[in-house]
Amino acid sequence: LRREGLVVNHKKLFRLYREEKLAVRRRGGRKRAIGTRAPMLVPLRPDECWSLDFVSDQLTDGRRFRILAVVDDCTRQCLALIVDTSLSGMRVARELDRLITE
């Protein structure tokens, strides 16, 4: 009603809802995790675990480009930054294979 420009007292509105046997839709509660989660493993040695991250941005002329960042979780060192207008799955696999052989 307020969006339509009508100002109605909230107590009057609640009384009208109750008389018409209407119910205000309640929002769902927060979903809680069931059980306990396994703790995240902390890598103890370099090259034990890597993380991949895709970043996307746009050039001033409107063309989009993507960046694949490969980070070592133990040393937090960036192992590779691969930049291209499109990164296919084959290209990502090829770059990961190249990193493994280094």
Image: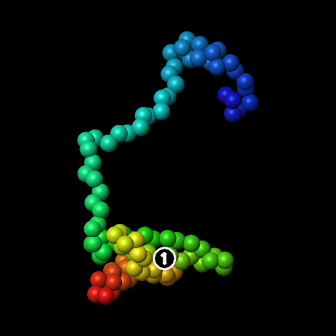
Q: How many numbered tags mark residues here? A: 1
Horizontal side of residue 93 vs 9, given as left or right: left
Q: Nearer the viewer, residue 90 or 43?
A: 43
Q: Position of residue 41 (x, y in %)?
A: 27, 60
Q: Secondary structure at mark 1?
A: strand
From this view, report whether residue 64 is shown above or below residue 13: below
Residue at position x 67%, y 28% in the image: 1
From this view, report whether residue 12 is shown above or below residue 77: above
Q: Amino acid at mark 1?
A: Ile
Q: Residue 71's quadrant in the figure?
A: bottom left
Q: Nearer the viewer, residue 2 or 94?
A: 94
Mark 1 closeness class: few <14, some 14–19, many ≥20 residues within 10 Å:
some
Q: Residue 95's quadrant in the figure?
A: bottom left
Residue at position x 49%, y 82% in the image: 84
Mark 1 lies on residue: 67
From this view, report whether residue 12 is shown above or below residue 32: above
Q: Nearer the viewer, residue 99 or 58?
A: 99
Q: Position of residue 48 (x, y in %)?
A: 27, 72
Q: Nearer the viewer, residue 91 or 71?
A: 71
Residue at position x 50%, y 76% in the image: 66
Let me know if residue 97 appears in the view. Answer: no
Let me know if residue 29 appears in the view. Answer: yes
